[in-house]
Image: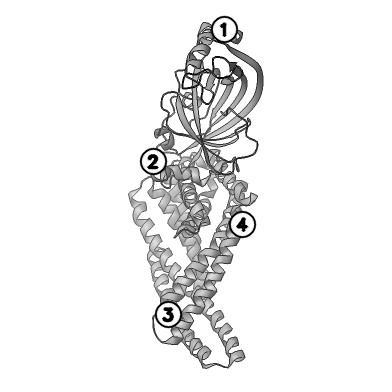
Amino acid sequence: MSIEAQSERVRTPSEQREIERKYDIPEGAGEPELSKLGAGLRAGGASTETLVAEYVDTPELAILGARCVLRRRTGGDDEGWHLKRPRSGDERIEVHAPVGAPRRIPPELRAEFAELIGERPVLPLVELMTIRTTTEVRGGGAWSAGGTRDDDDALAALICDDVVRARVLRIGDERTLEWREFEVELAEGASTRVFDEIEAVLFDAGLTPSVHTSKLVRTLDGVEAAQAPTGQATAGEAVVFAIAGRFGEFQAHEDGARRDAPDAVHQARVALRRLRSLLKVFGSLFEADAVKQLATELKWAGGVLGAPRDAEVLRELVLAELDAGPEAVERARTRIEQVLAERHDAALASFRAEVDSDRWDSLHDRLVSFITAPPFTDDADRRALGAMRRLTRAAIVTVEQRAERARKKPRKLERWHDVRKAAKSVRYGYEAIDELPDAKAKKQRKEWKHLAQAFGELQDAAMLDAELAVIIQNLDADHEREQGDAVAETVAVFEEVRERVRRRRGEGLDTARDALDNVT
């Protein structure tokens, strides 16, 4: 709640001190007669507005556990994200950020809880719609904290008459509540004695100090921190829990990826890949159209992240092959660093543009909606352990089919790449089962992780081979133009490296095929 209207949207986080008290309206209470305010205070005209707020937290209610509140509110003169820090008596500090896109938490506010929540998801918990009628209180009772009397027209407080409709959004805790309450917020610089004058009128009408510290606490009365599902839960609950966990990983690394923090692009991309794999393996638990639409957007976002990540990987792979040596090697190192740095910067710029797009905002909204209101099919009601095992075994059949196709033309590495992608889906399927937990899944997850890594090394070698071929081709063109021995020496270095990579690629294929034979 804000005392003064803002002339424009706040662009950066800002702090605001809030001093307020809340009051319940017991059955039989009357309407407060604000015309009877004493000590020179007088009530002005009333205005009514509708406020809609979505409160977010981890499934374990970690933010509330830290005595904080995080919400996004629209309507009123202080639209935006609000982080309410722990209360001290009647006072608490709020941190505000621009309203932004729905269900996309400002990174600076998530960072406030980084150590507390780690990679856990922050999801909608409660939606509140409040029809608020606000009355300004002005006049001689608006003493300053120093005890001196302000001018007779100074704002002393706001009295808010709130009609509230609250809805819990978490699976298994869906409920709707309605009530009416009063809030009194002290104006900046006013003495707490203003509360005494207003409370005299409220208490005369039968109102009482609220037994709840906030609307959120009242709504969540009896709602417990979520527990990780077990094998006895429904398959739908278990898979949604796994999807939420991967979404939390994505949330945790998304801003770091935008800032190009170390390893953040990689981790954000892995989180998206895990999400896609869960939809592939367990998609039959959800409506087909919803799965298809979400998978399409995840694939797009993964591709956006893929370009800067591939540039990172190529740089690491190439430079690892160029050991310190003669001048030609140093020239090669300098050249590849420059080329791949330019490619990475261009890909990162493209990624940042997409992150700021409406489509990226929509991705967050789709994911959150899928998690908080899952489009379950009847199969989602099956027992988690059995259903998830059956679906993961079906994913293994896909691996076997692709492997059989690849073996017919083993030199076509793109077919082995298809095997790798299918194997990763199986790996992440067993990862979700292991979280139930399940002792057998732990061993299977490790086996399929080893297989996916073996094919990943093969893919890296293939990607490096293709990149080196392009580099050599470009260097040959330079050599024709410049007719210089220096370029020829550099070409020779890259050709030697490429030959070494191609030998390793062949060995990698044998290793990956052996690993595949061990698990299928």
Q: Residues within 10 Å of mark 3 (few under 14, many from 20)?
A: some
Q: Give the mark nearest the N terminus, 1 or 2.
A: 1
Residue found 53% across the figure and 19% down from its top: 184
Q: Which mark is residue 322?
A: 3
Q: Nearer the viewer, residue 196 or 81?
A: 196
Query: Disc 1, disc 3: CB below 8 Å?
Result: no
Using the numbered discs, state the Cα–Cα distance from disc 2 to disc 3 in whole angstroms. 50 Å
Task: Locate the N terminus and report the quarter of the image it occupies.
Answer: top right
Using the numbered discs, state the Cα–Cα distance from disc 1 to disc 4 in whole angstroms. 56 Å
Q: Give the mark nearest the N terminus, 1 or 4.
A: 1
Using the numbered discs, state the Cα–Cα distance from disc 3 to disc 4 in whole angstroms. 34 Å
Q: Amino acid at mark 4?
A: Ala
Q: Which mark is residue 353?
A: 4
Q: Give the mark nearest the N terminus, 2 or 3.
A: 2
Q: Residue 46 falls in which quadrant of the image?
A: top right
Residue found 53% across the figure and 43% down from its top: 105
